[in-house]
Image: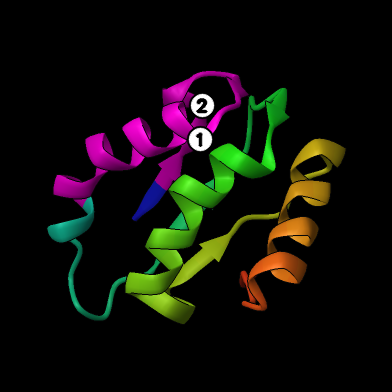
Amino acid sequence: MKLELSKFGTTLISRELGSEAFRAFLPTLRKLADNENLEIDFAGILTLSPSWADEFLTPILDQLGKRMVLLPTDNLSVQATIKILQEANKKTYIQNP
């Protein structure tokens, strides 16, 4: 399954909004097949803050592990945020090459 984050907006900031987005996505996440990957697509995202991403991506990573795959992006905001999360949470956010 591919999830286009832009469905939540193009400027993804604040813990509150990230948590709200996660809660809205949770019913869809629960329907994901046991062997199905979730590909996170950052196309169209202008800004991704570490706080929003931590509230949205980290719980998904906790549930899916290696089945959550981040699609490649040239967006420096997204790249920096993923790096910050990996260092802060000591977790690996799998990125497709």
Amino acid found under the numbered disc labelled 2: Ser
Give whichever of 38, 17 is nearer the camera.
Answer: 17
Q: Which mark is residue 3?
A: none
Q: Quadrant of residue 14?
A: top right
Q: Residue at x 62, y 55 (%)?
A: 71
Q: Quadrant of the N terminus?
A: bottom left
Q: Position of residue 4 (x, y in %)?
A: 47, 37
Residue 81 drawn at (x, y percent): 75, 48
Residue 63: within the magenta? no
Q: Where residue 43 sits: x, y (%)?
A: 63, 33
Q: Which residues are magenta?
A: 3-28
Q: Give the residue drawn at x 57%, y 45%.
A: 53
What amino acid type should be assigned to the residue bearing mark 1? Arg
Pair 1/2: label in front: 1
| Viewer-nearest residue: 1 or 14 | 14
**Residue 33 vs residue 54: left or right?**
left
* Badge 1 density bin: few <14, some 14–19, many ≥20, Cα 10 Å: some
Q: Secondary structure at mark 1?
A: helix
Residue nearer the viewer, 91 or 37:
91
Q: Please determine whether, in this image, residue 41 is positioned above or below residue 34.
A: above
Name which residue lies at 83% across and 42% down. Answer: 74
The answer to whether residue 20 of the structure is visible from this angle is yes
| Residue designated by label 1 | 15
Q: Are marks 1 and 2 in contact (CB under 8 Å)?
A: no
Q: How is the image coloured?
A: rainbow
Q: Which residue is mark 2?
A: 6
Toward which corner of the image does residue 10 lie, by quadrant? top right
Q: Main secondary structure of the magenta part?
A: helix
Q: Quadrant of the C terminus?
A: bottom right
